[in-house]
Amino acid sequence: MRALVFVAALSIFLSLLSSIASHQFTIDGTVLELDESNFDSAISAFDYIFVDFYAPWCGHCKRLAPELDKAAPVLAGLKEPIVIAKVNADKYTRLASKYEIDGFPTLKVFMHGVPTDYYGPRKADLLVRFLKKFVAPDVALLNSDSGISEFVEAAGTHFPIFVGFGLNESMISNLAIKYKKRAWFSVAKDFSEDVMVLYNFGKIPALVSFYPSYDERNIFYGPFEEKFLEDFIKQSLFPLAMPINHETLKSLKDDERKIVLTIMEDEADEKSKEFIKLLKAAASANRDLVFGYVGIKQWGDFAESFEVTKKTKLPKMIIWDGNEEYFSVIGSESIDEEDQGSQITRFLQGFREGSVIQKQVSGPSLVGYINSLIGIRTVYIIVFVVAVIMLIQTISKEEPLRVGTRDQVDHASSSTSLAESREVHRPGDKED
């Protein structure tokens, strides 16, 4: 009997604590300023809270602050409100250590107390649209043509969109939960023939995927077993040929497929645009590979990591494993201007036949790439620690003090592999 009374009292006490925590904060559309004394209370008080771990001296943080101020009242007004908060992680180092903050700003979404890294856009309107994804239903149920249009418009262009026409919700619910952070999912029960014409599918059931920002669409007619559905969804999460930059590279880290990487002079010029069209055609017939491209003008440091110099004939195609190894195809080291479609075909055929040379990602420019992923502040700390260790070792050997050469520094810095930078330093968008 006493045990039951104790349990009941404990339950009431915990409820009171929760009530006190929830009343300590209000959802009024302002950005909360948190510290070590109230951080845990805030996380437990709200189902969804977006936290900016910043430093007062950080220029990027200063530019982000007004965007968060604009987004806060909009997100607070949602049916499932999202609260925006910020923490001076340079001052409150215990929180910074707990949540592995190694660059600024670091952004995290706490959903029912569980943190998830945020790599999305930072402009207020785009940030709002992106964060709505976290509180949206796993699968939206659409019952009319207008409902479909409204869903697609509200979803925006940042994520791929999947609409199951004539599909049962249960067929995709598990996969919708699994890929919720990367795509929108819905099923349409009632729709007209006009919708079938608009989305270009000829029979039902059908799962239609489209990526508005790349103007691409794919249709899946089955079989509707989970394995085949997941293969289709995974392949449709990326455009047929995607530009490689900081954001898209992070999105590839969980994909196990090899990357057909084309390095070009400038991905925005007309010749490159025509070549990209050929890449998309090849990608549609080789969905077991990811096709990407990067311009030296857009990201020279990354391109130079694959033995690209001023003398390299471009475009150059390689097969990259997404980590520290890549393959050049014998006889297809570069692509001539004539009949480029056939050359792409020969390149892929040579790769599948094993006519390749295996190489390691290398080059001094890799240091700049690593810096961009882990935050320059962390790099400074690493260099300082290495310098101190070298100094101690030199003194212990009783040799004259010698200043390390630039080559020595470059060698030490470049010893961190590209694979390690992708796996260990996940918050790739940290800029200070």
Image: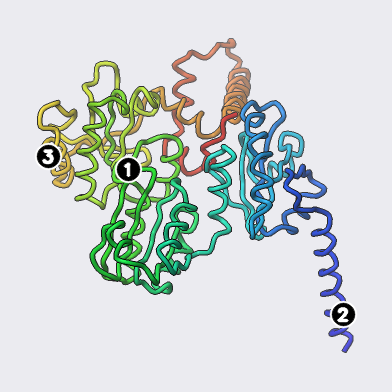
In this rendered view, identify the residue nearer to me: 173 or 326.
173
- Report which quarter residue 5 is drawn in: bottom right
Find the residue positioned furthest to the bottom: 1
Give whichever of discs 3 and 1 has the lower sequence position: 1
Give the residue displayed 56% in from the left and 34% down from the top.
Answer: 430
Spatial CA distance of label 3 from label 1 is 20 Å
Mark 1, Cα crowd under 10 Å, few <14 / some 14-19 / many 20+, is some
Residue highlighted by disc 2: 6
Residue highlighted by disc 1: 321
Give the residue displayed 27% in from the left and 48% down from the top.
Answer: 289
Tag on residue 197? none
Q: Classify mark 2: helix, strand or loop.
A: helix
At label 2, the amino acid type is Phe
In the picture, measured across the screen, residue 241 lies left or right of residue 344, that is: right
Give the residue displayed 79% in from the left and 53% down from the top.
Answer: 26
The C terminus sits in image quarter: top right
Q: Classify mark 1: helix, strand or loop.
A: loop
Spatial CA distance of label 1 from label 2 is 59 Å
- Report which quarter residue 303 is drawn in: top left
At label 1, the amino acid type is Asp
Residue highlighted by disc 3: 346
- Count of numbered badges drawn on the protein: 3
Q: Are the two marked residues, 1 and 2, in contact with CB atoms closer than 8 angstroms? A: no
In the picture, measured across the screen, residue 401 lies left or right of residue 354, that is: right
Q: Are the two marked residues, 3 and 1, in contact with CB atoms closer than 8 angstroms? A: no
